[in-house]
Structure formats: structure tokens, C-alpha cells
């Protein structure tokens, strides 16, 4: 049985949906059932459900976006850094292997040679560089702590999306905004993320960091063009002239725009759809809320 932390959250729910569809035994745990953010509560949960694996999909991203993290720094730090550290200690005591949902938002841009960042590249959008959002800083700090443990998978995703409209779905966000900044990014289709995470567990791949993003790079304008071609939205989207205008027109927290290299997990035999094809397939079966 797999225990999923973060029962009220978007990603935890998506993990549970996929496991249910594939008849994989699991329990989706929310803090309203057991407060797993305390040592006593986490131990209670593990003793009650005796999972073979734990997934930490809990965290704080801010609503409607990372700007909210700047106003709720204590909550952000507790959820994104302190909680993973606590889980690591307790799972080590219990001799339990587990997985932590991290993010590619601890990077900015791409490598000097134009390639995406790999798992061995140190984050460049973190507290150590003093250039990041508070959210990205807490996620990078959590990874730094977790690398001291050898019983944890660190799964990095970027801007998750699928065919079901949701305020947390990246494609839904693109559709909802009237004006965009043209960027090049990596993104992650949710069903392939969950499938890849499950393969790590079931195949007992070596623990450590895995970038799980659909191969390739995509521009904002390419996504919008596909959205319009599939008649998901007929909106006439506008674009900021440049990054300076984006940040000055409305005061914003620094955003991560980056490219990740997902070769490591693909070299383990796990298939990920090319990024343009992944979005095309998703929009073909788009479901509005």
C-alpha cells in the first residue's frame, strides 16, 4: 500500500486518481485526518497504514500563484522545507523508502551550451543566489537537506498539466491569462509523471534526483497556437514586449523560466512523450470544468 501525503492538494489528488484507475492500493492522507506535519502525527500515520512506500505530495505553492508565498513565508517554509526534513528522519527510522515531489523551479534559464539542467547541476534560482521567489528558495533548500539521505526519490516536475481543466493545471492558467511573456520552458504531463514515479518504486530504480519533464522545449506562443487550433479558447492573447515590461507592468515575484534535461529517467527505460506531442494529445481530449 502506498501512502500519499497532501490529501487536499492538486498533485496528491492526481496521484490518487491515477492509482485508482490502475487499481494500485493506496491511501490519500490529509491533515484533517491525521496531522502528519508533526512527528507524532507522522509516526501515527505510518503505524496505522503500514505503507510499503510513502509519497510526499504536500507543499505550499500559493494561491493563485507563487506571489502568495511572499506573504505567507512561515507556512511556505514549514510545508516545503521543514516537512520533507521531518519525513526524511522518520522514514529513515522506519527503514521506509519514499518519494518527494520537488520542482524544476529551482533553476532559471538553460546551461551555457543551450542544454537543459541535469540532476547533477546545482540550482541557480535559490536562496544561495539571492535571486529567487521564496517558494523556489524553500524547495531548493529541501533538496539540499534530502540529499543527505539515501532512501528518497526526489522527483522534479515543471508546470504540470493534463486534459482536465483546473486552476492548478498549467494549460488552464495559460488559457485564463490575457497577456503572456514569451518564454522557453520544460513542462510535465501529469499522467506520465505519476507513471514514472510508480516505475521508480516498482522497478526499484536507484534513489536520488530525477527530472520528470516531457522531452524537448516549448515556447509560450507555441502552446497558445495549439490551444487556438483545438478551439479550446478563441481569445486574442497579447504578449509583453519583454521581461522588463512583464515585471514592471504588475509587480511580481521573480519567476522561474527554465529547461530541464530528462535523459536520466528515460535512460532507465521510462518513456516520456515529446513535449509538443504531449500537449497536442492533451488538447485533443480537453475537458472544461
Image (cartoon, rainbow, N blue to C red):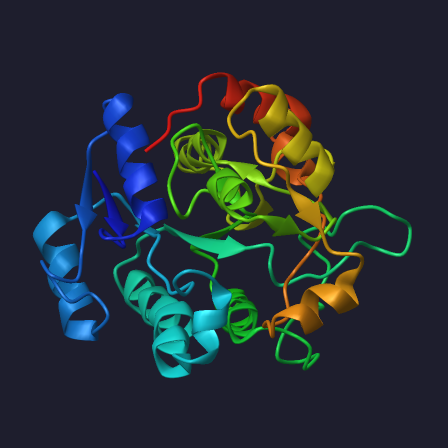
Please say if 134 is above or below 64.
Answer: below
Q: Position of residue 183 (x, y in %)?
A: 74, 49
Viewport quadrant of the N terminus: top left
Percent from the top left, x then y, of residue 259?
Answer: 72, 48
Instruction: Please name whichever residue, 240 or 287, is drawn nearer the observer in this view of the structure.
Output: 240
Residue at 50% over, 73% down:
138
- Place of residue 273 in the rendered image (x, y in percent of width and height, measured from the top left): 61, 24
Q: Position of residue 245 (x, y in %)?
A: 75, 66
Dividing the picture into quarters, in which one does residue 235 lie? top right
Residue visible at 37% across and 41% down in the picture: 166
Q: Could you tell me if residue 160 is visible in this image?
A: yes
- Number of on-image labels: 0
Is any atom of residue 215 visible in this view? no
Residue 111 appears in which quarter of the rendering? bottom right
Side of 219 where 288 appears, left or right: left
Is residue 165 placed above or below 83 in the rendered structure?
A: above
Foreground pick, 56 / 274 = 274
Q: Which image quadrant is residue 95 in?
A: bottom left
Q: For this view, does 278 lie left or right of residue 218? A: left
- Quarter of the image that includes the C terminus: top left
Image side of residue 226 versus residue 162, left or right: right
Tell me the residue at 24%/70% (across/down). Answer: 37
Q: Is residue 46 left or right of residue 243?
A: left
Amino acid at each position: 500500500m502506498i501512502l500519499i501525503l497532501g490529501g487536499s492538494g492538486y498533485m496528491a489528488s492526481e496521484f490518487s486518481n491515477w492509482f485508482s484507475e490502475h487499481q494500485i492500493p493506496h491511501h490519500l492522507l490529509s491533515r484533517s485526518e491525521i496531522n502528519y506535519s508533526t512527528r507524532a502525527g507522522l509516526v501515527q500515520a505510518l503505524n496505522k497504514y503500514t505503507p510499503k512506500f510513502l509519497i510526499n505530495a504536500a507543499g505550499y505553492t500559493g494561491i493563485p500563484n507563487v506571489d502568495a508565498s511572499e506573504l505567507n513565508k512561515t507556512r511556505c517554509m514549514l510545508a516545503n522545507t521543514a516537512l520533507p526534513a521531518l519525513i526524511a528522519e522518520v522514514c529513515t527510522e522506519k527503514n521506509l523508502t519514499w518519494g518527494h515531489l520537488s520542482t524544476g523551479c529551482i533553476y532559471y534559464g538553460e546551461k551555457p551550451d543551450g542544454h537543459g539542467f541535469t540532476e547533477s547541476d546545482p540550482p541557480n534560482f535559490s536562496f544561495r543566489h539571492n535571486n529567487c521567489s521564496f517558494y523556489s528558495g524553500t524547495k531548493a533548500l529541501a533538496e539540499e537537506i534530502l540529499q543527505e539521505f539515501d532512501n528518497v526519490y526526489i522527483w522534479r516536475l515543471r508546470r504540470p498539466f493534463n486534459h482536465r481543466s483546473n486552476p492548478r493545471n498549467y494549460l488552464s492558467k495559460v488559457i485564463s491569462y490575457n497577456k503572456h511573456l514569451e518564454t522557453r520552458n520544460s513542462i510535465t504531463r501529469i499522467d506520465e509523471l505519476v507513471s514514472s514515479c510508480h516505475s521508480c518504486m516498482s522497478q526499484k530504480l536507484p534513489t536520488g534526483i530525477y527530472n520528470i519533464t516531457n522531452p524537448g522545449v516549448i515556447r509560450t506562443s507555441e502552446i497558445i497556437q495549439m490551444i487556438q487550433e483545438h478551439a479550446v479558447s478563441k481569445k486574442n492573447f497579447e504578449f509583453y514586449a519583454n521581461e522588463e515590461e512583464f515585471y514592471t507592468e504588475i509587480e511580481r515575484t521573480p519567476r522561474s523560466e527554465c529547461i530541464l534535461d530528462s535523459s536520466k529517467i528515460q535512460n532507465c527505460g521510462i518513456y516520456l512523450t515529446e513535449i509538443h506531442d504531449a500537449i497536442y494529445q492533451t488538447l485533443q481530449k480537453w475537458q472544461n470544468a
